[in-house]
Structure formats: structure tokens, C-alpha cells
Image (cartoon, rainbow, N blue to C red):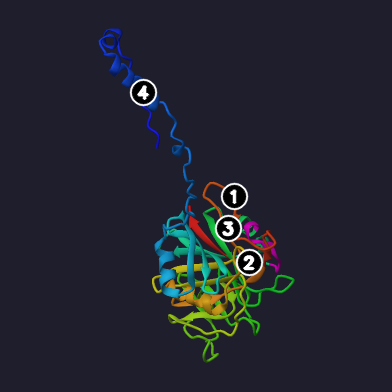
Amino acid sequence: MRKFTKPVRAGRYILSQVSPYCMALLVMMASFSGCKDDSEDNVEVVTPPEVVDTDVTDLTQKLISGTGLVKQFKSDTLTRIADGLALTKLSYVGQADLPVTMFILEADLKNPKLTMQALLPYNDYLNGLQRLSEMCKDNQKPSSKIMAAINGDVYSTTGLPDGYFYIDGFGLKTTRTTTSSSYFALLKDKTPVIGGLDPITRAEVPGITLTNIQHAIGGRQWLVKEGQTISSTDATLTARTALGYTASNVVYAVVVDGGQEEYSIGINVNDLAKIMQTLGTTRAINLSGGLSSTLVAGSSSSDQWTMKNHHPKKLESTVANGWGFVVAN
């Protein structure tokens, strides 16, 4: 590196005392000091290293260590939406060298102000389809605020859900189709439960009284039961939505984007089950996926809800119902 120094001027008296020999030597030294060193301009340009996100959240580290799905970590972000409610976005390259991006919503229902509610299109007790962001606005109650929401059940073209659908203790749909083998429910005491057909015996899971249900939405395959993953033959890589809970009443909702080769290819059912198991859920189920997979979030100061995940068509799809995560005022 070239160093610049402030020139020093010698007074006339001092210079007048310098001998001719010394004067010649000083002139020669000055001429050398003024020469340009060409090597200083031939500076090697070093390309800065690729910026890598090394600030890994505890939840992300748990998934990296516990699932065996992550070949290369890319990035993650953690957003505190409300007390007891947090959203993590995780991007990684999987073992098959394919990109995956997922959103993990963590809701601690032990928080007295935090709960869940089933959402229905236009807040109308009729079958229908509506974007989840608009559904949040229509299902908003004066005493609380929907801070986040995920899509719910599989549905027909008319918006008829496949499985159970209870809202505020009222059974909008109390029957299930053959494809609806599970349901997620919130009991009247705010306890989360998962019921339906046992994935092994195919008998009805005991211990849940339907009259005790405050909210419920049907689901598809079981992912985790009593802490153990349930094997599936569905190996399709696609967008998916999962919902489960831990023994300490912490609910995890996972939305995985899919169908986008450069961004997120999706996930199969068995790998989704590994995710839910590693998060610590005792029971977890697969909800409607594909273009239905949606996660939206709002804020306490706005009546707008924003879609956080990304669809291949860049648009938010309409769905038949959803789960809202609600904070009391």
C-alpha cells in the first residue's frame, strides 16, 4: 500500500549551510522519492467470498441435526409475530441436491392470550372458496386479532371439505369421506388434539368426544402418532402443509413450497413426517397441499394479511377453510 507523507520544507538558513556534496545527495534522494512504483498499481483484485448465512436459529439447528434431510444450509430467518407466536423461514439444499424452502409457525398455546380458530369462507356457514388472506379479514372478531393462518382441508370444486368441520362448537360437517383419515381439533378447554382413523389398526382413535370440540378441520395422512413417524408410500415432491402439537401444547404448522426447481422443489410425506417428529410433536397430520398450501401473516396495526410462502403461479389460491392463530386484545 502506498504511504503518503507530508512534505517538510527546509528554511533558507539551514539550506545555506549545506555543502555542495550534501546538496547533490539531497537532490538525488528527492528525485528517487518522487518516482512512481508501478507495482503499487498492479493490485490483485480478490473476489469477495460468497455470503453465507451462518447465524442458524435453534429451531433450524434442531432440524439440521435431527432429520438428516439437509445437505447444505442456505438461510433462515426468525420473526416474532406475537407473544408465543413465531415464524421461521428455512431454505436448504436436500440430499438429492434439490432446493427446499419451508415456513414453520410455532404457537405456544400455554400463553393465555394465544389460541386457534377455524376459518370459513366469507365467515358464512355455506360451502365456498376464498383466499386465505381475505378469509382472515372476514373472520376477524372485535375481541381478538388473527395474526397468522394456514390452509386447511382438501375440498371439492364447490368448496365442500373432505373431513370434519367444526367452528365455535357447531358442526358444519360431521361426516368424513374415505380420503379423510384424520382431523385436528381444538377442544373447549383450548387443548389441541388429533383424531380419526388409527394409521395402523384403521379403527377410530379413542378418547375424543365430538361434543367437546370447539374447532376442527379434517386432514389426510398421519405423519406422527405418539412420537413415532408413520410410513407412507406417497413419494411425490410437492408443496405440503402439516399441523401437529407437542406434549406441552406447542402447535407447529409447517408449509413447504414446491413445484419451483430453482427455489423449492417440495417434500414427500415421509420427509415431512421427519420434520414434524424432530420438532417434537406427539401427533401430526398432513393437510391439503399443492397450490392450496398457504401461510399468511398479519400485524396488530393493520387489517391486511400477507402471503409469506410462494406459489409457482405467483398467486394466492382459494381454499375451503383454514386455521387462524389468534391473539386476544
The amino acid pointed to by label 4 is Met
- Counting residues from the start of the chain, the first of labels 3 and 4 encountered is 4
The amino acid pointed to by label 1 is Asp
- The stretch in magenta equals 126-134
Q: Residue furthest bottom?
A: 201
Residue 172 sits in which quadrant?
bottom right
What separation in Å lies between label 3 and label 2 (alpha carbons)?
19 Å
For the residue pair 190 and 257, the one nearer the viewer reads as 257
Can you identify the residue that label 4 sits on? 28
Q: Is residue 194 above or below residue 36?
A: below
- Can residue 209 be seen here? no
What separation in Å lies between label 1 and label 4 (alpha carbons)?
79 Å
Name which residue lies at 46% across and 72% down: 245
- Counting residues from the start of the chain, the first of labels 2 and 4 encountered is 4
Q: Residues within 10 Å of mark 2 (few under 14, many from 20)?
A: few
Which-is-in-front pick, marks 2 and 4?
4
What separation in Å lies between label 3 and label 4 (alpha carbons)?
71 Å
- Counting residues from the start of the chain, the first of labels 1 and 4 encountered is 4
Residue 106's spot in the image, x, y percent? 46, 64
Q: Does the magenta-highlighted stretch encompass residue 131?
A: yes
Name which residue lies at 42% across and 60% down: 56
Residue 309's spot in the image, x, y percent? 59, 60
Residue 57's spot in the image, x, y percent? 41, 60
Can you identify the residue that label 2 sits on? 261
Which-is-in-front pick, marks 3 and 2?
2
Q: Residues within 10 Å of mark 1 (few under 14, many from 20)?
A: some
The answer to the question of whether label 1 and label 4 lie on touching residues, with beta carbons closer than 8 A, is: no
The amino acid pointed to by label 2 is Glu
Can you identify the residue that label 3 sits on? 308
- Counting residues from the start of the chain, the first of labels 3 and 2 encountered is 2
Which of the numbered marks, if any, corresponds to residue 303?
A: 1
